[in-house]
Amino acid sequence: MSVKERVISGGIAGYRWLEHRLGLIQPLTQAAEHPTPSNSASWWYVFGSAATVLLILQVVTGILLALVYSPSANEAWASLQVLNHNIPLGWYLRAIHGWGSDFMVAIVLIHMMQVFLFGAFKFPRELTWIIGVGLLVLTLGMAFTGQVMRFDQDAYWGLGIGASIASRVPLVGAPLVHLILGGPILGAPTLSRFFALHVFVIPGILIGAVGLHVWLVLFHGVSDWPMPGRLVRKSTYELQYHELTEKTGLPFVPDAAWKDAMFAAAVILAVLACAFFFGPFGPTGQPDPTIIQTAPKPDFAFLWIYAVLAFLPPEIETPVMLVVPVLAIAAMLLLPLFAGEGERHWARRPVAVLMLTVIAVSLGIFTHLGTYTPWSPIMSAWTSDPVPPKYLRGRGPLEHQGALVLQDKQCRDCHSLDGAGGLRGPALDDIASRMTEDQIVRQVLQGGGNMPAYGNALNPSETKALVSFLTTLRGDNLAPAVDASRTLTRNP
Amino acid sequence: MSILLKHPGESSNDDLPPEGKAAAHSRRTFLFQLSLALNGAVGIVLAIPLIGYLLGPAMKKSSTVGAWLKLGSVDDFPVGETRLTDFQSPVASLGDGETAKVACWVRHISPRQFQVFAINCAHLGCPVRWFAQSKLFLCPCHGGAYYEDGARASGPPERGLFEYKYKIAGGSLMIHAGDMPTLATEASCDKKRLIQIDGAETAS
Ligand code: FES
């Protein structure tokens, strides 16, 4: 026997020894080679496996970070500085974990949209979808608790926002707040509980649920490519699917899996590239609640919630905050039970496509708004953005005084001039072509329409000066606003 | 499962007669049910302390939490001004570090009259900032605004700022602090001033 033959026969003997004791290699190989309809070996079917690969990346990098991270309120922030600056490649590990999280949320959402659009949640894959909804919630839970791990100013005030939302639950609000915080204030017990959630509880459930999800995919087979007019019927679908795989089936590995593997590699590479070029997220300022010069903002995945919270009118805010998330999750869970049969192709499901578009566009818009928070006053605008000289040219002393008042009374924090200043209130560049002098006086003194009243903060001469300046702001020399009733009463 | 293992019924190496098998079977079934009941009972005995431990922090009555503490000398706060100050939370726990510090706004109205506002916005708890010139508290998160007396001015908050109870003892300003103020945990705050609906007057 040559050396080569001996090595081969030794290898085979070793495999037999192991499989005889383990008993897993054969069934796993069979599962990997399970036949999948040739039409679903598509680039559209790669998102689920990419999400799983990202989860593995997150687990590995998470464990590595836990080697250094200190989950204690008085050390967490400093231990992140150590990771960023003192531990070789610590910054890179943090960056991979942070970007991996953003990618994972994105890929899970894309996977869900694809499954929804392809009607792949219908019979017999209802439970696969339901567990998938759970996986989405768990992924978002990981993203939120992960943001808390950063334990910087954003994390501190973000937790405060979470507790304040919980405080609005009727009857059990106070116990719920204490349960979240782990005590009367936000501090060491709070971070410890979110650490336990982030590294033990949620990942444990997540990994178990992913296992179940994958098992269901194997059990029912990868869903076939939807065809317009080919309806899902509980009585016939499984037979048809069986015939389809009989006729066109390909072994999942390697005939379909090469696309999954390629895409997963591309995604991981993208995470690594983002991590390398853009670096880790934060930490922002230290979690000292007495440093109030801060504008807390949640991570990317939650910006849309942040925006929605700014727009809800106070009267309906609590019910909307507490009821809508429950309804939304319930609707997703119940979807396959109510739409478990029928047409799968998107071209024959206009309502589904419309719904998805509306939801995606609104999430996109709210997220975009969340990136520049037009509703927040720019707290430094009154000292940093001077009145543009062109608005002072040709004005008299009273108007100049008015411009000073405008600046001094922090009007610019909410109102912009020439594109600089807050966006909370309307820009003032052409205010006099929209409001008459009387209307401006009334608005300034009494407020209204989301503007505080300044009657207490302005004396009559300041008001007079301010209004006389504002009445000169007519954009590109538009006509001044006029009160139609006045001309009527003056010239009967 | 190895291919060599057989399910009972498939196997033939059981030499009990059918009646004996059935009798033994029903006895074992009973024992199994008994063991289930036993484990259920043990489970309850185990679960009670676990749940008690978990819910411990939630069970504390808000009104019992907190203490009076000195915020500073009355002279530290000039009459007519609103100033930022901070204190060490009386309910801090081990390892809180900087998070045990609490900031608040002190408004000195007249020699013996104060208002001490929580830093937390009544909307969702972000830190509000005071602007003396426009006499407004502004919130950075969603643009809530409050007047100098803490009443809601505009934006998402549905009520005025939270206020701490205060008293003046021997020339120093004392406040009662405990829970982080939220809509549900305002026990250490001054109840009578809490109901400040839009435009309502406060004692000042
Ligand atoms: S937290 Fe202050 S406005 Fe939302």
Image: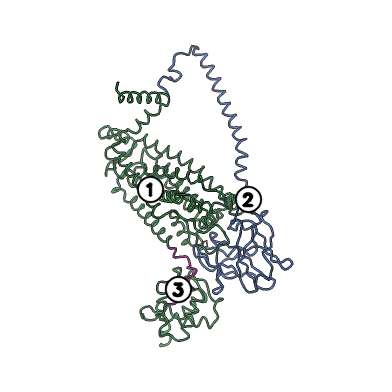
Measured in 3D between alpha carbons, the distance from the residue under mark 3 to the one under mark 1, in whole angstroms, is 41 Å
Residue range corresponding to the magenta coloring: A372-387
Q: In this rendering, is residue A51 above or below A11?
A: below
How far is disc 2 from disc 1 in space, using C-alphas? 40 Å
Q: Nearer the viewer, residue B192 or A411?
A: A411
Task: Give yes or no for contact between labels 3 and 1 (Cβ–Cβ under 8 Å).
Answer: no
Q: Secondary structure at mark 2?
A: loop
Q: Residue at x 59, y 56 (%)?
A: B99
Q: Chain of mark 3?
A: A
Q: Which chain is green?
A: A
Q: Residues within 10 Å of mark 1 (few under 14, many from 20)?
A: many
Q: Amino acid at mark 1?
A: Ile
Residue B61 in the image: state x and y as whole percent. 65, 51
Which of the labelled discs sits on residue B94, or is there none?
Answer: 2
Chain coloured blue: which letter?
A: B
Nearer to us of marks 3 and 1 is: 3
Q: Chain letter of disc 1?
A: A
Secondary structure, magenta segment, majority class? loop
Give the amino acid type for the residue marked by disc 2 in the picture: Leu
Q: Which residue is mark 1?
A: A107
Q: CA distance from mark 3 to mark 2?
A: 45 Å
Q: Is mark 1 within 8 Å of ligand 1?
A: no
